[in-house]
Amino acid sequence: MIKREICERVLARAASTGADYAELFVENTLNHAVNMVADKVNAITDAVISGAGVRVFKGLRSVTASTVDLSEEGLLRCASSAASALGEGKAEIEISLTERLFGDVHPVRIVPSSVPNKRKIAILKEGYFAARDYDPAIRQVTGSLLSFDHNILIATSEGLYAEDRQIRTRLVIQAVAEKNGETQTGGCRPGRRMGLEMFDGLIDPRETGIHAARQALVMAGAGYCPAGVMPVAIGNGFGGVIFHEACGHSLEASSVAYGMSEFTGKLGQKIANEKVTAIDDGTIPNAWGSINIDDEGTPARKNVLIENGVLKSYMIDKMGARRMHMDPTGSARKQSYSFTTTSRMTNTYIANGTDRNEDILSSIEYGLYAKEMGGGSVNPATGEFNFAVQEGYLIRDGKVAEPVRGASLVGKGSDVIQKIDMVGTDLDMGQGMCGSSSGSIPTNVGQPMIRVSSITVGGR
């Protein structure tokens, strides 16, 4: 996108006041969306994001500047702004860039931007009308087919000059059902780091729509969940959001390096039940959260965070590495060029265990089966979290009983991972967008079915 020689001059300007590290991040992204509501395509939108960010370090100081002017003059002005903000000094590093090719383990066969909207609309309609026609109680359906073509260039004073292209596709169907004057919402949002070939046998749009409608219908007919402390079985796939939020954010250098995490200084210590092995892996082919290189140019890798209950590693970006005196782990990410990069998750999951799902459920005399989790929030410093249950059922005498709505799970990350005492074998992933200080990024969450022996369930 920007010639290597120009990048060298921009980095030299950025480092001219004494920086010991300089970085140029250039982005050109095309976001495309087809939206449906009220049985009609109501919007087809394209958004182009184009710009560059310059970042400089000096010790533990960091300055970031950004610009939409990608001419050499514009990039040099941006670099001068960053250099000036860093302070006064003399250039201490020489800039010489070498192009590096990291390969791509996420092949794309059908680039969405090259496909006529007619085909995209047909895919979306399959999912939309499958949800609308599922049952007369379905009152409203909305749907979107989203594609993201994210092109980046990273050049650094360490000599790196590299490009990457990240194409992602996602189908989102939401349905609203009404029973006895009560309405509830169901949803399904599959996504992959793939093109439209995602719908050639991997993701069925009809099944996506049916899932959303079925969930809405079940929850519309449900009574309210009773509150109390009880054992909970959490379903696979998006159930992994509870680890992502309650523990994952507390394992990022953005919290750990500043002593703002409950897991700071606990490497090598047992922090979870021995049945828990948790991993963040940015290398899974075509997974929603996968990357070839992170947004600092560090190659993606598989990071074992917790192994058999023992804390093994954190997720670390370059500034976090400086503060923690550890190596970066390929975990630096940001929404776009205008954000400052920090440590983030990619595909984070609890690995398969050895317990059978039927044994997990039958072990609970009375409790909650959180079949599918919803959104939530967490304080990384304390690990305290609160999550909604999107689809839940009571468990009575070891059997899944009536559906319940309004359930939430409340607790503390360091407590809940100690109480995960059964781990199933049906690992699956769910797709989401994770928001943090460096913006909103695509992340996978995952797990097999697990049992939490005791947790506070919010309800009525």
Image (cartoon, rainbow, N blue to C red):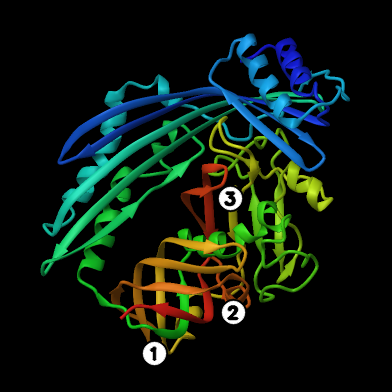
Q: Which numbered disc covers residue 86?
A: none
- Look at the picture and state if 298 lies above or below 249: above
Is the C terminus in the top left, top right, bottom left or bottom right quadrant?
Answer: bottom left
Quickly name the residue at label 1: 397
For discs 2 and 1, the disc positioned in front in the rendered view: 2
Residue on which disc 2 sits: 419
Q: Residue at x 31, y 39 (%)?
A: 144
Real-space CA distance between mark 2 and mark 1, rounded to the nearest whole angstrom: 21 Å
Real-space Cα distance between discs 3 and 2? 23 Å
- Closest to the observer: 63 or 134? 63
User: Taking 376 as reference, is 337 left or right?
Assistant: right
Location of residue 320 with respect to 362 vertically, above or below? above
The one of 95 and 399 positioned closer to us in this rendering: 95
Question: Can residue 358 be seen here?
Answer: no
Q: Are marks 1 and 3 in contact (CB under 8 Å)?
A: no
Tag nearer the camera, 1 or 3: 3
Amino acid type at mark 2: Lys
Q: Dot 1: within a 10 Å radius of its alpha carbon, few (fewer than 14), some, or many (20 or more) residues?
A: few
Residue count near mark 2 (Cα–Cα under 10 Å), binned few <14, some 14–19, many ≥20 = some
Q: Position of residue 146 (x, y in %)?
A: 38, 35
Q: Secondary structure at mark 2?
A: loop
Of labels 2 and 1, earlier in sequence is 1
Measured as percent of width and height from the top left, residue 141 is found at: 21, 48
Residue behind mark 3: 347
Instruction: Identify which residue is drawn at 76% across, 28% down.
Output: 22
